[in-house]
Image (tube, helix red, strand yellow):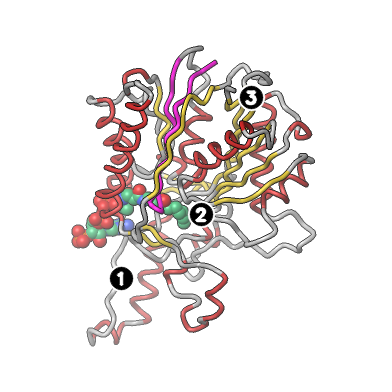
Amino acid sequence: MNIVISGSGLFTPAHSISNDELVIAFNQYVDLYNAEHRDAIAAGAVTALEYSSSEFITKASGIKSRYVIEKEGILDPTFMRPRLSERPDEAPSILCEIGVAAAVEALKDAGRKAADVDLVIVACSNLQRAYPAIAIEIQQQLGCAGYGYDMNVACSSATFGIGAAADAIRAGNARCALVINPEITSGHLDFRDRDCHFIFGDVATAVVIETEEACRSENAFRILSTLFRTQFSNNIRNNFGFLNNSSPETRDSSDKLFKQNGRKVFKELLPLVTATISEHLQKQSLQAADFKRFWLHQANLTMILFAAKKLLGREPSAEEVPIILDRYANTSSAGSIIAFHLHSRDLKPGDRGLLSSFGAGYSVGSMLLQKR
Ligand code: CO8
């Protein structure tokens, strides 16, 4: 049974923050902090904070701007997080709202109605609550049949989610699935931390998964093969969770937001990514040269280009390896799907493409696709 990605959708928030805007707000915070702690800094008891810089951000990451769900709160040096009022339980949650927007576009692209869908998987890094599942809320909002559940494999959530949907269809548990990646990373990012305040952006993506036999789409991609790998690491970690209430003294400490050791991630994750993809290609008796396009996880420009060069054995062209992180930043699970959504329509029947996500866990998902 051949399984296809028959449609994709993208929700982009209305607000964008440039590096300059972000750095101005951060540096205002630094001034406030250092003024407040002037005596302790002079006595050597507190370390003064240092300014951030747009030049550093662009050079170290390739990111020039990011979309966010709410801008004013993030740029307020006395607040520095998106200002989102809590919604009543009767109203759709914000993750549901942006997930639905991406899903509606994906369904249209696939030539499907919500009622055709009998599995909804929400796969993302930044779930807004423990339960009920956002996927079940989306199932209800859209009017889908069957069942739904949430899952989290950090940045690899999308490929792991597509794999789970394909398996469910092969097993006869579903016929048509929506895999949705709503990421409000700005709620989990420490905008007071110079090392990471620039890394992430908000977005939602969705894809429709079904059998090739049932597919009605002009732009469908057959899933030729998948390979998933995980390897435990503390180098990308967020300790937020319901047990935080049991330790009220540390409930608001900075480890309850995203933390990473970026250099170590670079050194340890990249070899895992290239080894996993190489193993996958070898197992399928294929080579990187057999692929027209590489939709890679969008975490860092150097990282993307390094991985592509290692696989191809030469510099990749801009057409082969689409980059969207310059304006979207790292959107966690959604990054490779944005690249796929925006840069797949020009491929011709028979062309192959490689979709890969990687990140916390560590986790790597590799997916070999072929245009129908
Ligand atoms: N402005 C100016 N200088 C800075 C800044 C800044 N903003 N930040 C750091 N510096 C300084 C440092 O202090 C350091 O100074 P010194 O040399 O004096 O010590 C110098 O610049 C160099 O710093 P780094 O070594 O940290 O710089 P790098 O070149 O390594 O670049 C990056 C930093 C961009 C973070 C880079 O290491 C990187 O991208 N690494 C890979 C990261 C990655 O792929 N992570 C995956 C994360 S995604 C994921 O899976 C998590 C999902 C969860 C999502 C949650 C959303 C919130």
In the shown orientation, is residue 118 left or right of residue 268? right
Q: Is residue 301 above or below residue 195?
A: above
Q: Nearer the viewer, residue 250 or 211?
A: 211
Give SS at disc 1: loop
Q: Which residues are magenta?
A: 351-372
Q: For the stretch drawn in magenta, what is the main secondary structure?
A: strand
Residue 185: mark in rendering: 2
Viewer-proximal residue among 139 and 19 = 139
Q: Mark 3 = which residue?
A: 211
Q: Quadrant of ligand 1?
A: bottom left
Q: Mark 2 or 3 closer to N-term?
A: 2
Q: Residue at x 77, y 46 (%)?
A: 141
Residue 364 magenta: yes
Percent position of residue 204, x then y: 58, 43
Residue at the front extreme, as displayed: 171
Residue type for callout 3: Thr
**Label disc, if present, on residue 89 of the rendered structure:** none
Q: Please state the horizontal and vertical placement of residue 3, each as a whole percent of the image.
A: 58, 26
Write down the quadrant of residue 165 in the picture. Answer: top right
What is the CA distance from the residue labelled 1 to the residue labelled 2?
24 Å
Mark 2 CB lies closer than 8 A to ligand 1: yes
Where's the C terminus, which quadrant?
A: top right
- Mark 2 secondary-structure assignment: helix
